Image (tube, helix red, strand yellow):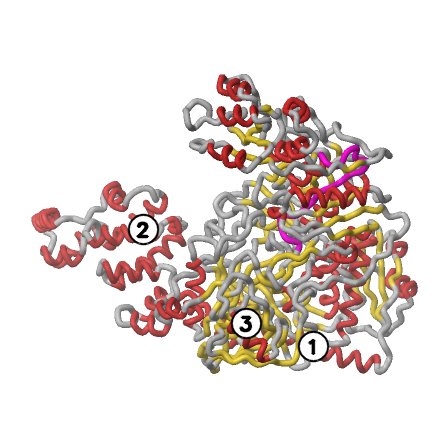
Amino acid sequence: MYSKEIQKKLKDLGVEIGDSVRVKRGDQVYEGILMPKEELGDSNAIVVKLSNGYAIGIKFEGAELEKLSGHRQIGFKSSDEKIKHIAGKPLISIISTGGTVASRVDYTTGGVQASYNASDLVSIVPELGSFNINSKFLFSMMSEDMTAEHWKEMAKAVYKELKTDTSGIIVTHGTDTMHFSTAALSFMLKDLNKPVVFTGSQRSSDRGSSDSFINMICSANFASKSDVAEVSLVMHGSSNDDFCYAHRGTKVRKLHTSKRDAFKSVNDEPLAKIFPDGKIEMTNCNYRKRCDGEVSLDDKLEEKVALIKTYPGMDPGIFDFYIGKKFKGFVIEGTGLGHVPTTIEGRSVIPKIREATKAGIPVCITSQCLFGRVHDFVYANLRKEFEAGAMFCGDMLPEVAYVKLMHVLAHSKDLEEIRKMMLTNIAGELNERTPVFEL
Amino acid sequence: MKCGIEIHQRLATEKKLFCGCSAQPSEDKPIATVERMQRAVAGELGDVDLAALHEYSRGRKYRYQIFPQTTCLVELDEEPPHSMNGEALEIAVEVCLLLNSKVVDEVEVMRKTVIDGSNTSGFQRTSIIGLGGFIETSKGRVGIEAICLEEESSGIVGEKAGEITYRLDRLGIPLVEIATSPDIKDAKHAREVAEKLGMILRATGKVQRGIGTIRQDINISVPEGARVEVKGAQELGLIETIVDKEVRRQEKLVKIKGELEKRFGKKRFEKPAVVEVTEIFKNSASKLLRKECLLAMKLTNFAGLLGEELYENRRLGTELSDYAVAKAGVGGIIHSDEKLEKYPISGEEVGRLREKIGAGAHDAFVLVAGDRKTCMRALEAVCERVLQAFEGPQNEVRKVLPDGGTSYMRPMPGSARLYPETDVPPIEISRKWVEGIKLPEMPEERKARLLKILNEELAEKIMLSENYPLFEKVVGELKVEAKFVATTLEETLVSLRREGVPVEKLNENKLMELFIEYKCGKFVKAAIPEILRRVSKNTGESISSAVEKLKLEKMGEAELRKIVEEKKKAGVSSKTLIQEIMREHRLRVDAEELSKVI
């Protein structure tokens, strides 16, 4: 943002962002288009885009500003054009929730702007023109801001689309917490009959090298053609622009901050390899198939669940904090096979597990290793944890256990029933066997 | 004629512009590759850049080679850029000051859309550091328009069947771009300006040396012509030829335009029909023509024009062919103003071809061979270029050919290709910091100073040499005689290199060690080539150990006296004494000391 002084001056001169201006400072004269100011940089320097396309910052103090004729629309304007559905093309639904995929750079904030109508999407990814698209704008948010309320909204929107004659649904989503959302929808949409595909991008779609194009194309193909009636996550399968993987929504995690292939299947094989030309290779034969059955929506969630990571030297008092705040369940991200600090008095988490369990608050154990399963018996300390009442969640990912516990607690208050539900597979989140090779 | 040049010079920083990789291109073999696609996207003002679209229309795949020390996730476009390299920014500001350019108050890093694949991200990060400025030349002042700091692109390794391979070691090396105003008077002047700018850049002592580290782009237009950017001149010697040929090309195209107006009058040139002629060449003697598909096109009223020479070995037909090559990826085209016997195409075949497409004596024809889709694209490109002939020269980017001629590369990019790099914050430039930057001596001043201690030849050699900083250090700090230091660095090393001694392995520290040992009296001047020969091949060895192994220690006074005594005893006359001793012990005896002893 420009400083108050500059904003006032612009207002007085009737100059708006996008106007052609001449700036004189000392013996230097600059002409160009007045650009918006990012949140960063010197708010007392105005940014002018010169005729050669470059922008420069000019200190406003002592500068004379003059408005010239001419104005440019800065940024992307959504198209009003409606695209008619053409018989014979597969129908897909695209629900936009924000993030970088299928969005345009908003030069007013320097960020990205969701573009949600079908013709905008086709203008960005022309290959989507071979589908009939029902597009729906749900929200435009960065995924780190999402809450259980948003998952419910998403589940409702997807459920509504599932009731139409669409062949599959795409949800575009910010990547950071996409795996939480896929897990949430996996539990909330019962008896799925069509593919529900989440996708995003790691490189914004304003650049020619963006991964969003291939991610969108592969998602559209997977949603319309595949036989997988599950919630899945489709993103780049490698650093190359060669194929995408469809990961099961309850067995996937973002494992890199910035790479295209940041998402990996954990403790499971990806469901399928999808190529930009539309070819789909199944890589996992264990999945729910498309069917004519009725899907149902079960969007109840208990939000008072905490996900706690253990680490050397941690203060077990954190559990008291949450219990004091009337939390109804805990998921612990333990070390190794599911350990928590056990033997040193005052540092041990075991008394907290016992206390919570006694109070009817379930304590679920997962591992911060992510890969592999937890175990309740191989070390004495694990046995102590188990005896205190902890529920060992097999090969379930911590984030998935967190979402699942929210779901389970909304359906039962009985500790034994909760334990049974947590340890029973609902949506592919628990596997009895661990694959030998990672794909 | 209007002419301006752009100089791109790699900076000798330790690290790249936006990451921690080494800025020295790799000598290693690539350890892996990644494969990517790119497509045209909208720029900041909502337009898709023309040049970007052009590349996309070619539908290519890009393969990038990864090197151990010079490639990280930033070059792979798998990690956001780090903050801008302060060392590079300082050098760029220094260059601005040397060229009388006004440094901006705040640097805005931009993304310049580039989708020939040479940048993994699809854009090059670039920013204006200075605006305005000038240099003085023999033909008056030449203005500077802008000085930019940007990322070097990837180096091209090869191209085959729709796939281009690039190496990533070069990507992201800091590069200073200097664009002059169109003040250049003629071809010779263009060379002078390029030389002068090159000298000023080298005077900073902070630019990379060697092949490919400096490149010139030349912008040329003639009256009624168009703005043409000729890219990638690496040799100064070629600049005059490039300017000369481009001027002639544009002038000739203006003449052709006039001729077309005469021939067509008010008639319009109709887009010609594409006719399949595969059948005619089914049994052709030319292997080139026995292809899956042959398509031809009649160019009404064009007889003779395609053969019009623009300059040596370039005709209007070559221009048509360039378009077909660039836009459709064919090997070339065949046209009626060529010597068709060379393919060979018989007179009878030409007759049948002309008949089939309805081409009369006033008409020309174009023929392409290959698969149908490619041929169609090629003829479309030819048609596009033919229509442009009615408008004269076109604004475009051309690449330099080895003979100083040029060929079509892509349309002139527009300003739509620049938009903000939102991953790098703007950088405020403090006036105090700029004022504190110490400027190097300018070439003229340096020469004047050096002439006091060196002859003109040596002064000119050392003043712009990459060894100059070392020269200053040795002369200034060790107080070693300037002429000897300059001769060692600029002549001894050069003649050893010519012998095939790997002197490039000698770094500054090693050479410094040599002068220190010399200063301490370890050896005499004449021993230096022998010592350098040995340590070049074995850089791990210290200079003093090499001297000992070679038995080249300078003779002490006692030993010298002994030899003199022996010679005298043996009856050597005092006249020939010095000569004889020097002949036998040249590499170990200092003549001056010897004469003192005698």
Front of the two marks 3 and 1: 3
Residue A272 in which image quadrant = top right
How far apart are labels 3 and 2 at the CA level?
Answer: 37 Å
Q: Position of residue B330 (x, y in %)?
A: 75, 56
Tell me which amino acid carries mark 1: Lys
Do the numbered discs 3 and 1 sit on residues whose CB atoms are within 8 Å?
Answer: no
Q: Is residue B359 visible?
A: yes
Vertical placement of B460 versus A149: above or below? Answer: below
- Secondary element at image label 2: helix
Q: Percent position (x, y) of residue B394?
A: 70, 72
Q: Which residue is mark 2?
A: B509
Please indicate whether residue B368 sits to the left or right of residue B238 in the image: right
Range covered by the magenta-colored residues: A187-205
Tell me, yes or no, whether dots 3 and 1 are on the same chain. Answer: yes
Q: A136 or B235: nearer the eye?
A: A136
User: Foreground: B362 or B439?
Assistant: B439
Position of residue A418 relative to residue A2, above or below, is above
